[in-house]
Image: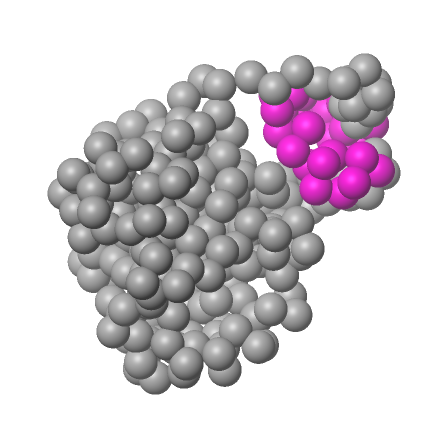
Amino acid sequence: MEILQSDETEKVEKLRSRLNEAAPQAEDVDLRTLRRFLRARDQNVEKALKFLLQHLKWLQDFKPLGFIKESEIRNELNKEKIFLQGVDKKGRPVGLILASRHFSADRNLEEFKRFVVYGFDKAIASLSDDQEKFVLIADLEGYGLKNMDIRGYLAILDILQNHYPERLGKLYMLHVPKIFERAWKVVYRFIDPNVREKILFVNDNQVAETLSQDIDISQLPKQYGGMLELKPIQSVVCNMEPAS
């Protein structure tokens, strides 16, 4: 686990104190969560407090049970478009998104948001004790106009940045077609600079080489030169405790 610097430790303790004053019922928020929200607001305690309080309210409204039931996202799960298996060389879980299996005309936005939260929670529940981040591979091979979903992408971004700060370790974008540029130009403006620097567009003829630099072939799916069969996220067994 990463050791906090003395200045950050002091700010985390101050954030804890301010949170206890503002929301005594939130006393079970752990140190790691405080640190992530603090870092996401450049160590500004008051901004981090506001950010965290908004998140806690969202948790209460959006995830009252502390988790998303699979019965609430059945349409999304049936498409088998998100997979989770293996870890990178830093020990971070690897998720794979097959974008061509997502159809904007066949999705309910609220169900899709629940599906995104379910996916993030699964990745987090797969973390080892010394890790806080996951990595994602977004494969756009076969992507066309029918798959474009700007509202869906903005929903993903909102959930990631506002409710899972400092969780994304890296995002590899593979086989990106020219048509995706239309969506990217819109979405890019809303991406936090700290998230932007974690996004890597991979050249089509360097996919296996690029991925294997960070992920051992024993931990990669077979279609990228690895050894793993794809495992739909709903089939991954892990401790699904409330996550953020």
Look at the image and tell me in which quarter the N terminus lies. Answer: top right
Reply yes or no: does residue 61 show up in magenta. no
Whether 34 is among the magenta residues is: yes
Figure colour scheme: one colour
Question: Principal SS element in the magenta part?
Answer: helix
Taking the spot 40% from the left edge, 38% from the top edge, the residue there is: 214
* Residue at the spot 60% in from the left edge and 42% down from the top edge: 165
Q: Residue at x 39, y 30 (%)?
A: 89
Residue at 41%, 81% (x, y): give it: 178
The percent position of residue 237, horizontal first and vertical second, equals: 23, 30
| Residue 140 screen position, x and y as percent | 33, 67
Residue 191 sits in which quadrant? bottom right
Q: Quadrant of residue 110?
A: bottom left
Give how far across and how far down residue 113 sits, in percent. Answer: 44, 58
Q: Total of numbered circles in the picture?
A: 0
In front: 190, or 114? 190
Residue 71 can be seen in this image:
no
- Numbered range of the magenta stretch: 16-44
* Location of residue 193 with respect to 176 vertically, above or below: above
Q: Name the foreground residue: 95 vs 78.
A: 95
Q: Is residue 145 left or right of residue 151?
A: left
Residue 78 picture location, percent across and down: 18, 58
**Vertically, is 46 above or below 16?**
below
Can residue 101 be spotted in the picture?
yes
Going by the image, does 45 lie left or right of 132? right
